[in-house]
Amino acid sequence: MNVKTSSPKIPRKPLSASVARPINELLDLVGQRWTLRILWELRDGPSTFRGLQLRCGNLSPTVLNKRVQALRDADIVELTTSGYALTTLGLELGIKLLDLTKWAERWSRKRAV
C-alpha cells in the first residue's frame, strides 16, 4: 500500500508593523484604491468631505471616509477649519510621488522601445 504523506502547511503570518519596512507600509497605504486620487485632489489646498467626494468623481462616502481616516492615522492628511488638507508630511509625499511619476514615465518609454 502506497500512502502519500505530506507535511502540514504552516500558515505564513503577515509581518507586523514593527517588522515591516516603512517603504512597504507606505506602498500598502498609497496602493489602496482611491488613495492616490485623494492625495492628488488635496494638492492645491483643503477641501470639505463633500467637496473631496465630488472631486473624486462622486466616490462613495464609505470608501472616502476609510481612505481619509487611514491617511489621517498616517499623519498625511489632517482635518482643519477649512476641511481636509495635506500635512507637512503629506505635501512632502506629494513631491516624492511626482518624482516617482516622472521616473515611471521614463521607464515606460524605455521599455516601449
Image (tube, rainbow, N blue to C red):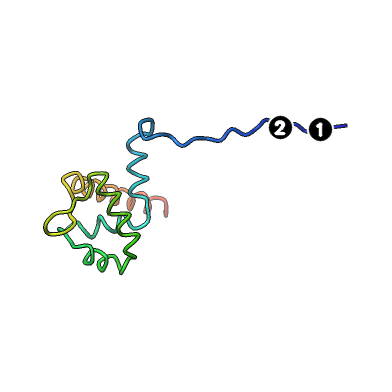
Q: Is residue 82 left or right of residue 28?
A: left
Helix, strand or loop at mark 2: loop
Left or right relative to 71: residue 86: left
Name the residue rendered at 25%, 51% in the picture: 98
Report the Cα–Cα distance between label 1 and label 2.
Answer: 10 Å
Q: Is residue 2 left or right of residue 66?
A: right
Determine which residue is flagged by label 2: 6
Other-residue count near label 1 (Cα within 10 Å), few / some / many at <14 / 14–19 / ≥20 = few
- Give 106 or 32, whichever is nearer the viewer: 32
Say which quarter of the image contains residue 18: top left
Amino acid type for the residue under numbered disc 1: Val
**Which residue position holds label 1?**
3
Q: Give me the residue at 26% from left, 69% from top.
A: 54
Type of residue at label 2? Ser
Position in image of residue 25 (x %, y %): 35, 40
Work out which quarter of the rendered image holds the N terminus and state it: top right
